[in-house]
Image (spheres, rainbow, N blue to C red):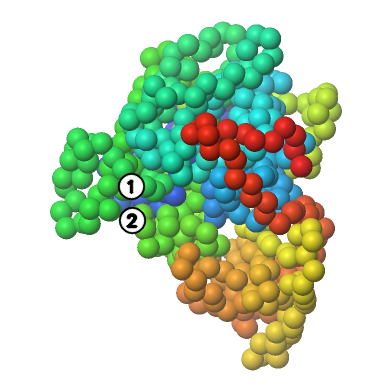
Amino acid sequence: MLLTLVYFAAFTYVVHASKVPTKPNIIFIVSDDHGYQDAGFRGSDILTPNMDRLAKEGVILDRHYVMPQCSPTRASLMSGRYPIRTGFWKGNIKPTEEWGLNLNETTIPEMLKRNGYATHAVGKWHVGFYTYDHTPAKRGFDTFLGCYLGSQGYFSHKNSKNYDMREEYIDKRGRLVDNIRYDLEDKYNTDIFTKRAIDIISKHNKDEKSLFLYLAYTSPHAPLQVPADKYEKYTSHMVGETTGRRKFAAMVSVMDEGIGEVVDALDQYGLRDNTIIVFTSDNGALVGGKGSNYPFRGGKISLFEGGVRSLSFVNSPLLEVTGYTNKHLHHVVDWFTTFQYLAGDQTHQVKKPQLPLDGYNIWSSISRNISSGRQEVLLNMEEADKIYGSTDNLAVIELETSPSGTTYEVRDWTKKNNFALIWSQWKLLVGDMHADQKGGFYENLQLYDLDTDPQEQNNVKDQHPYIVKTILERRPEYKKNMTMIYRRISTPQDKANTYWMPWRETEH
């Protein structure tokens, strides 16, 4: 029942009758290297009518943080745990590296599956595949259609000349079926993923189970490829833009088209009323690429806002308040805890031990526009002495004295340690903070007031020594929870098969 309407700006702020979701369907959509401004509802000239409608009729998340790279964000989402715990603080998994999301980690699909959900993954995985036990169908998904790696040709489905498009499921005898889908070669992968998502929705029996669909597009990650007819359809208005920017825009628009088709399927098959749709980018657009993180500084790989403040929204008939922009602090790890709440999960009744979670239940925060209680976000930290076999002095503590005479205990950025944390409106960066992939190291201690300076232009560390001290005091506690990691091990697999596949029997 509609209770209240309050009109302001271009949005309609709507308050609905209180609803308590009961094991709702969850459609979690992730875009790839998608800039904060690269959607119509953020002021872009990129055509995204479906995302615009979902965002404006739902809740736009203004302070939803992710990690600065693909693998760490996806591992944080799946596990509900910061990269310092999972080992993903070292960054992306490269194709032949022997590591992944550890098998003792409980994933969102595992958790939801034990609560009666059907679980399906479509699109990009990128959290490890060096053993079959690390692949999606072994991590809680009933089915998977997509790619293991972080990128691929959109038509060829190849990475480093090897094919990477497969379908996985566990058969009735409990055996993993890994079907290489050569029949999909030359078909545009964004369309493949959309079609698969619609097929899952059309076959889902809503009377038996709730649905969790993880739809992880690779768009608009490089390479910039798009069907010729869609390029013309979606960019004819972008007069004066470069070909690269127009390709990027068309890729986003094709993805938006797919999202609209997925939502139409939810309506057509009667699932929409009990469904929560979450959309987020995995990190910001690459600085120097064709995306835009305006108005923020930095981009992918950077811990500045342009790298970690994501393009995000939630849409659902189950939301109590809609048509507004939520400015409360949220992080991608929060979704595990939130979905636990929505599914009614009881951790004390499960066989696999639940490792400590870092997330907050943010359902009420989003649904009712209230604080979740989260006051800080760890954006990342790197400590060289947390790498097995480290024999150098990379972890030496150094002192820096500000012009005001205050002494801080910090790590020298030349020694490859860093720490980035948001506390309330304050953001502290310590160490080697890239503005982009081409270098550009900056002062090794920076403090910004995000309320007044979200573009991170004015370093106010000397004006607020107490804030700096307070945030730095959190660092040792986080370090206690860091997982020791191995130096990167890369073992080229046998290329005779011409497709990517696991090459180890067991986890390290």
Residue 325 visible, this angle:
no
Q: Which percent across, then down, holds residue 472?
A: 73, 70
Is disc 2 surrounded by few (<14), some (14 to 19) or many (20+) residues within 10 Å? many
Q: Nearer the viewer, residue 160 or 149?
A: 160
Give the label, 2 or 1, closer to the camera.
Answer: 1
Residue 441 visible, this angle:
yes
Q: Where is mark 2, residue-wise?
A: 290
Residue at 18% from the left image edge and 40% from the top image edge: 232
Q: Is residue 155 left or right of residue 324?
A: left
Disc 2 on helix, strand or loop? loop
Asked which quadrant contains residue 171, the reply is top right
Kind of residue indicated by mark 1: Leu
Query: How far is disc 2 from disc 1 in space, using C-alphas?
Result: 9 Å
- Disc ID at residue 209: none
Which is more N-terminal, label 1 or label 2?
1
Disc 1 on helix, strand or loop? loop
Q: Where is mark 1, residue-wise?
A: 224
Asked which quadrant contains residue 354, the reply is top right
Kind of residue indicated by mark 2: Lys
Q: Are marks 2 and 1 in contact (CB under 8 Å)?
A: yes
Is disc 1 surrounded by few (<14), some (14 to 19) or many (20+) residues within 10 Å? some
Residue 222, compared with residue 430, is above or below; it is above
Residue 1, compared with residue 454, is above or below; it is above
Q: Which percent across, then down, holds residue 91?
A: 61, 54
Residue at 79% from the left image edge and 61% from the top image edge: 389
Residue at 37% from the left image edge and 47% from the top image edge: 223
